[in-house]
Image (cartoon, rainbow, N blue to C red):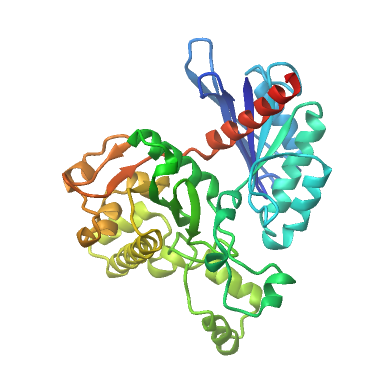
Amino acid sequence: MRILVLNSGSSSIKYKLFDMTERSVLASGLLERIGEATSSLTHGARNGRGEMTEIRKTGRIPDHRTGMRVIVEALSASGAKGNEPGLDGIGHRVVHGGEDFTEPTFIDETVLDVIRKNVPLAPLHNPANLIGIEVALETAPHLPQVAVFDTAFHQSIPPRAFHYAIPEEMYARYRVRRYGFHGTSHQYVAGRAAAFLKRPLESLNLITLHLGNGASVTAVEKGRCVDTSMGMTPLEGLIMGTRCGDIDPAVHFYLLRETGRTPDELDSLFNKESGLKGICGTNDMREVLEKAGAGDDRARLAVDMYCYRVKKYIGAYLAALGSVDALVFTAGIGERAAPIRELCCRGLTGLGIAMDPEKNRAGAAPPIEIQAEGSPVSILVIATDEELQIAEQTFALIRQREEAGNG
């Protein structure tokens, strides 16, 4: 069975085509700068010898519908054109499912209406996700298509963790609560951690750390999310590339009064100009570490602040879970920045978290264990693959429906 995964953004479409028999990637690509003067497509496909070959094309792509036609043409060489037998289903990443979706779901008009209803909760993402879905439905109307929601894995969080301490009307009428994001990634690495440790996921307590340009921490109890650092929006929680993370809410009011900035300008300030970028001028952790190593005080401060915030969440979630079997690092920084992993775990031996610095710095490819000998808590580095998780969930749902139909 071949599954195509689509991640439609406001000006881009990212995609991967999977052969689910071997969980292998047959083709992948990224169409960027849709609607701009010059758009670009980078497309890679596996040839008859099993090698990945890459092509790049430029030219103006005025809208997502045109973009999908270009992608379909590129995929046709991979045996997955339109709704022909070479393709068995399409899985779509959708950022926000609100309280409506706790699992992947087949897309129909009712599902589309609910995604539209949740646009106010994710105004930058859900509209773009919707466009990708609508175009895919037009392009391949006979294929089963599945929506997989970033927020779904976090819908098991109990009320004591997802409510804010504000009047009930704000939740009942305006749906103000903590939703969490990166759920697909956290769910994927939790499952891979269980497989690596050769234990059932339902027997494990895990703290999963998705550390990339966007970053979040999740407490996983017996396979279910019980808390996560992001809130109603992806702004809450850890320090990120350009997002400030946790901040006193009154700072917003103070800056509105003192700077004369508009709410939209403050929204941009906290989401696009803060975090690592706001502290030391760059949101790329590789550059931050390089500058810190060269003696840049602001870069050193950025690293210290970043790791300190992560450590606070590790401690908080260990308290929330009561005991932890493994700490799991993933995403760009979590997988590749050994100095950050070391600083995040430094001083936590009293909590049972002890890293082996040599294993951490060895540079071995994930999945790896980097805890010290005798450490009660395993420390794992696992590569995330959100697209594969979406493909697996889409595949499972299609198979489930086929088996029910045959039964």
* Image quarter hosting the N terminus: top right
Front residue (pair 35, 336): 336
Relative to 144, residue 251 above or below: below
* Image coordinates for residue 128, horizontal then vertical, percent: 71, 49
* Image coordinates for residue 366, horizontal then vertical, percent: 34, 36
* Image coordinates for residue 164, horizontal then vertical, percent: 57, 73
Q: Is residue 406 left or right of residue 20?
A: right
Is any atom of residue 366 visible in this view? Answer: no
Q: Is residue 297 left or right of residue 190?
A: left
* Identity of the residue drawn at 20% across and 49% down: 375
Is any atom of residue 329 visible in this view? Answer: yes
What residue occupies the far top of the structure in this picture? 48
What residue occupies the far bottom of the structure in this picture? 258
Location of residue 290 (image quadrant): bottom left
Relative to 201, residue 102 above or below: below
* Image quarter hosting the C terminus: top right
* Identity of the residue drawn at 61% across and 50% down: 152
- Number of labels in the image equals 0
Front residue (pair 354, 2): 354
* Identity of the residue drawn at 56% across and 49% down: 153
Front residue (pair 380, 377): 377
* Identity of the residue drawn at 66% across and 28% down: 400
* Image coordinates for residue 378, horizontal then vertical, percent: 28, 46
Q: Is residue 138 left or right of residue 268?
A: right
Relative to 215, residue 136 above or below: above
